[in-house]
Amino acid sequence: MGKKARKEREEKRESFAAQRSKKKRKTYLMAGAVFAVVIAIVGYSAYNFATNFSNAPGAPPGAGMLGGEHVHSSILVKIFGDKFDFSLPAYQIKSSWIHFEAQDGTTIHRHAEGVTLGYLFDTLSIDVSDECFIFPDGRQFCTNEDYTLKYYVNHEQVTGIYDYVFNDEDRILISYGSETPEEIEEQLRELDSQQILA
């Protein structure tokens, strides 16, 4: 009986050790699987955040990562020869992506790739199209038989600026009225004399 009992105890011990080893292996495999899933989720989230940051709430369509660029441009808006003042508080820093700042109304700051001038004007509630420049108070300056809305980028006349993404040091003129070529040249010289603030 002693041999039989000893053999049964050894078998129980071996069975218990095998069960315990199997249970440990199963626990480790499950923990490893959970850890791998967590790592995959974190990696996927980090990738999405890095590549799709522009999809953040309030981000302009097609914009790159906020802070990915910091470029400056000078702008001059002349309505019937009068300069429009973007240095007023109503036009200062309406978006982190593109804005006027520091009570300066001539330098535009762009802080991401792909942010258009149209987005800037949208944040200021100014409607800009190829034919019209419309202020938030409803004043409209549209091309008609007597007056024209004209856009210039670096002295070159363009048909519109809504989709334009300016480069560093660009100079942009928006002019409305019945100016002669000489008057446009004078406005372009005024634009060139404006300091671009960094």
Image (cartoon, grey):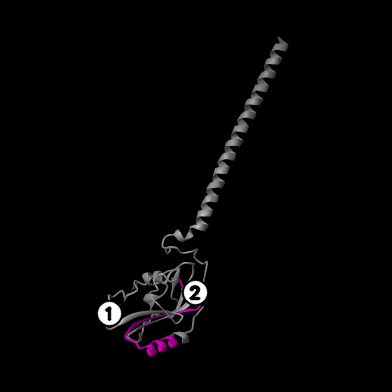
Eyeballing the image, is 26 above or below 139? Answer: above
**Residue kind at label 2, given as amino acid type:** Asn
Q: Is residue 164 above or below residue 34?
A: below
> Marks 2 and 1, Cα distance to the nearest angstrom?
31 Å
Residue at 38% x, 70% y: name it: 123
Q: Where is residue 43 in the image (x, y as percent from the top left)?
A: 55, 50
Residue, x 37% and y 69% (percent of image)?
122
Q: In which quarter of the image is residue 93?
A: bottom left
- Number of numbered discs: 2
Q: Give the range drawn in magenta.
A: 165-190
Task: Tell me the residue at 51%/71% (across/down).
Answer: 70
- Whether residue 168 is in magenta: the answer is yes
In the rendered image, residue 132 lying in the magenta stretch gets the answer: no
Residue 126 at x, y percent in the picture: 34, 73
The quadrant holding residue 172 is bottom left
- Type of the residue with mark 1: Asn
Q: Nearer the viewer, residue 17 or 136?
A: 136
**Around disc 2, counting alpha carbons within 10 Å, would you say few (fewer than 14), some (14 to 19), or many (20 or more)?**
few
Instruction: Identify the residue under disc 2.
Output: 167
Residue that extends furthest to the top in the rendered view of this protein: 1
Q: Name the residue under label 1.
A: 144
Between 143 and 79, the residue placed more toward the observer is 143
